[in-house]
Amino acid sequence: KKFNHVIVRRPCKAMVEGITSGLYPGKPDFELALKEHDDYIEALKQCDVDVTVLEADERYPDSCFVEDPALITRKCAIITNPGAESRNGEKDEIIGAVKKFFSDDQIEYIKAPGTLEGGDVMMVGDHFYVGRSARTNEEGIRQLTEILAKYDMTCSEVKLEEVLHLKTGVNYLEDNNMLVSGEFVTKPEFQKYNCVQIPEDEAYAANCIWVNDTVIVPEGYPAVLKAVQDLGYKTILVDTSEYRKLDGGLSCLSLRF
Ligand code: CIR
């Protein structure tokens, strides 16, 4: 077992106005999003973690995607500096929750002009892959590298061409297993892992989350579900249809540590 705690934030009514690339068209249905969020929390509770549920924050339409304003590691918590302007203030609202678990000297900050979003950071043991994206810049990556080094952890940059965040397209499931889709299939740095290639038409489901030997998989992606089960994991399905319309997936909806 690796994770003990999870933090989530309830979606707000304004979520229907959240940022979207339009890749998955349609406006989210708020009531359905709430129900899916309930199911998500239920699934997490089955994975032997305690779940802290933060209240909805109407000022920030995308604030249910708590993965982005913070990065929590085994040794420290890092408050990021989200590159999306409408989301930047979310960093100040996640601090309170992080302080329940970390003392002030274990909390670090990415500072302007550096930008970073947690969705761009993938943890593999004490190494962190960080995507250089429209949301995470070179200076943000430099600061992250410096912070991690202080705690004897390492970091390497991955250039993104197509996806919003690194974890939109690649996710580590522990035990050397990595789900890879699209532009990540051929990245040399991931070849040392047992890469499970996600078919193009199920690319959204590259974003699964490992929580203590259970893998939560988005509903509606049979090939990915089978691939994850073939790796030997117990699986739980959660429908994230309304978050998908905002380019959000399972990992985006929680901080796991
Ligand atoms: C955004 O564009 O920021 C949100 N609509 C979706 C954020 C998804 N988060 C993630 O991939 N970690």
Image (cartoon, rainbow, N blue to C red):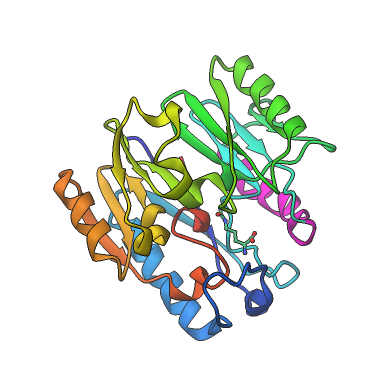
Q: Residue at x 18, y 57 (%)?
A: 226
In the image, is 242 to the left or to the right of 235? right
Compared with residue 184, is residue 221 higher up or lower down, i.e. above or below?
below
Q: Quadrant of residue 108?
A: top right
In the image, residue 57 lies in the stretch drawn in magenta: no
Residue 100 can be seen, yes or no? no
The spot of residue 220 in percent (x, y) is 30, 71
Q: Residue at x 80, y 57 (%)?
A: 85
Compared with residue 200, is residue 74 higher up or lower down, i.e. above or below?
above
Q: Residue at x 17, y 52 (%)?
A: 229
Q: Quadrant of ligand 1?
A: bottom right
Q: Which residues are magenta?
A: 85-101
Compared with residue 136, is residue 56 higher up or lower down, i.e. above or below?
below
**Majority secondary structure of the magenta segment?**
helix
Q: How many marks?
A: 0
**Quadrant of the frame with the N terminus:** top left
In the picture as drawn, the residue positioned furthest to the front comes out as: 186
Most foreground residue, 15 or 207: 207
In the image, residue 96 lies in the stretch drawn in magenta: yes
